[in-house]
Structure formats: structure tokens, C-alpha cells
Amino acid sequence: MEMRQSAQSESRQKRKAECLEELAFLELCRTADILARGPVLLLKAEGLSFTQYNVLRILRGATEGLACGEIGNRMITRDPDITRLLDRLEGRGLISRCREAKDRRMVMAGITPDGMKLLALMDEPVRETHRKQLGHLGRERLRALAKLLRASRERPS
């Protein structure tokens, strides 16, 4: 039994060495999953999903509001049904939507005062969660990590 486990471990080590890109990808996925759990629990306590929170943060930065398609483009994770997502936020009074006067096909969304209050309430607890999760890395390593992650999203031409 011990030899079998050793052989399996050796096989995994060999596979890791053969494809560092795959190893990095798997480590990134594992880490993202673990790190996402903290904020998700905080958001759940306020009745928000991570994607809903992301929409509210996007709209907080857009003082004039945004077209629904643009919100979708700025999302961290893609949601194929942005309309339904916005419906839920509007139903809670956290965003408002209206049709553009110049082009009635375009629907604009903006954050409401209630949405701003909820984000203000969540800001520090979310930051504290991130500090607890990643603060041990220190500022220099965090900057290096952020730089590496940005570089990984850029595709060579």
C-alpha cells in the first residue's frame, strides 16, 4: 500500500513538472475558491450574492449610471442573465433602471441611496476579511501577486 501511494505521489510530481502552466492554473483555482468563501459568508448575511455585490460596486463608481451591457462587461465573473440579476437588485430597492430617452432600446441602471448605504455598511467588514485572508503576505508580496495576476490575464500578441 505504501509503495502504491509513493508511486502515485511520484506520478503527480512528474505531471506537475511537465506542465507548470497547469500547476499554476490549479493552484489559482484552489486559492480563488478558498478566498471567495470569506466574503460570500459576509454577503450572504446581508442577502447578497457575490455577483450582486459586484454590480453594486460597479454602479457606485458610475455616477451617471451604466447601460446593462456595460455592467456585464465590467463584472468580475460573467453572469449570462444580467437582466434577472438586475431585477433582483431593483426589487430590493438597491438599484433603479430607466430607458434612455434617445435610444429606447438602451436600459440604464444606477445605484440608489439604499444601495449606497448597504455598500457603506459592507465596506469595512469586506476589507477586514481580505486583510485576514491575505495580510500575512505583506505589502510587497501583495503588490507582486497583483502584478503577476494582471500579467496572467494579458495575452501575448
Image: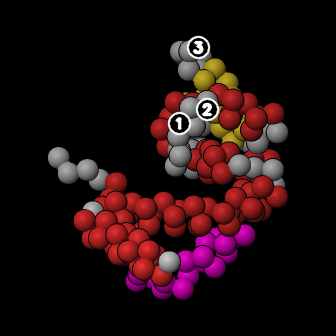
| Percent position of residue 33, x then y | 57, 61
Q: Looking at numbered disc 2 in the image, what kind of residue is underneath it?
A: Ile
Image position of 116 with respect to 4: above or below: above
Q: Nearer the viewer, residue 12 or 54?
A: 12
| Percent position of residue 42, x then y | 75, 62
Magenta stretch in the rendered image: 124-144
Image position of 49 with respect to 143: above or below: above
Identified at 70% across, 59% down, the residue is 40
Q: Looking at numbered disc 1 in the image, what kind of residue is underneath it?
A: Gly
Q: Is residue 145 visible?
A: no
| Percent position of residue 79, x then y | 57, 37
- Element class at badge 1: helix
User: To which residue does mark 3 refer?
Assistant: 104
**Marks 2 and 3, the one that precedes in the sequence:** 2
The reply, left or right, for residue 58 in relation to residue 5 is: right
Q: Is residue 21 visible?
A: yes
Q: Looking at numbered disc 3 in the image, what kind of residue is underneath it?
A: Arg
User: To which residue does mark 1 refer?
Assistant: 72
In the rendered image, residue 132 lying in the magenta stretch gets the answer yes
